[in-house]
Image (spheres, helix red, strand yellow):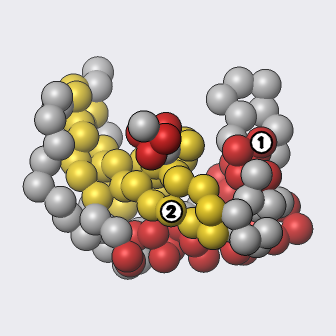
Amino acid sequence: MTVWRAAYSTPVKLPNDSVIPQDKIRRYLLLPQLEDDKSKFLALARYTLANWERLEKDLQAAIQLNEAYEVGSNSYGAVYELKAKWTGPNGKQISVLTIWIRLNTPGKTNFVTLYPNKEEKK
C-alpha cells in the first residue's frame, strides 16, 4: 500500500552512488511502449538507443546538481521526486520529473522512472 504526503518535504541530495539500471534505460525508457511510453518524449531531445549512455549520464548529473523531495513511501521504501532540465543531444532543452526510491533494505537509492515535467509549462 502506498502512503503519499500532500506537501513536499525538506529538500535532500540523493546519493551519488544511486543505482540507474542500464536495462531500464535501454529496454524501457528508450523503447516504444504500448502504455506509459517515455521514448517519444525523450526523442524530442534526440535521446535514442544509439546514445543511451548520454541519458544515463544526464540522470547521474541530475542527482548531483539538483535536490530531491520525499513525496511518499510504500512497503519498499521512501519515494523521491527530482526535477531537472536537460539539454539533449540535439540541443533542445526538456524538463523532466524523475522518480527515485530509497529502499528500506539494503538502503540503496534506485532510479524508478521519469516523466515530462508538465508544471514547467505553467
Q: Label 1, on which residue?
A: 40
Quarter occupied by the C terminus = top left
View extreme (right): residue:
50
Establish if 6 lies above or below 101.
Answer: above
Circle 2 SS class? strand
* Label 1 Cα crowd, 10 Å radius (few <14 / some 14-19 / many 20+): some
Q: Is residue 91 left or right of residue 106?
A: right
* Label 2 Cα crowd, 10 Å radius (few <14 / some 14-19 / many 20+): some
Establish if 72 lies above or below 51.
Answer: above
Q: Label 2, on which residue?
A: 85
Residue 45 falls in image quadrant? bottom right
Residue 25 falls in image quadrant? bottom right
Circle 1 SS class? helix
Q: Residue at x 53, y 54 (%)?
A: 95
Q: Nearer the viewer, residue 53 or 120?
A: 120
Where in the figure is residue 120, as x and y percent of width and height? 45, 45
- For badge 2, the amino acid type reads Lys
Using the numbered discs, state the Cα–Cα distance from disc 2 to disc 1 in whole angstroms: 17 Å
Where in the figure is residue 83, as x and y percent of width and height? 40, 55
Is residue 78 at least partly visible in the picture? no
Q: What is the number of callouts on the image?
A: 2
Residue 56 falls in image quadrant? bottom right
Where in the figure is residue 62, as x and y percent of width and height? 45, 69
Q: Is residue 36 left or right of residue 59?
A: right
View extreme (left): residue:
10
Quarter occupied by the N terminus = top left
- For badge 1, the amino acid type reads Lys
Q: Residue at x 63, y 69 (%)?
A: 87
Disc 2 + disc 1, Cβ < 8 Å: no
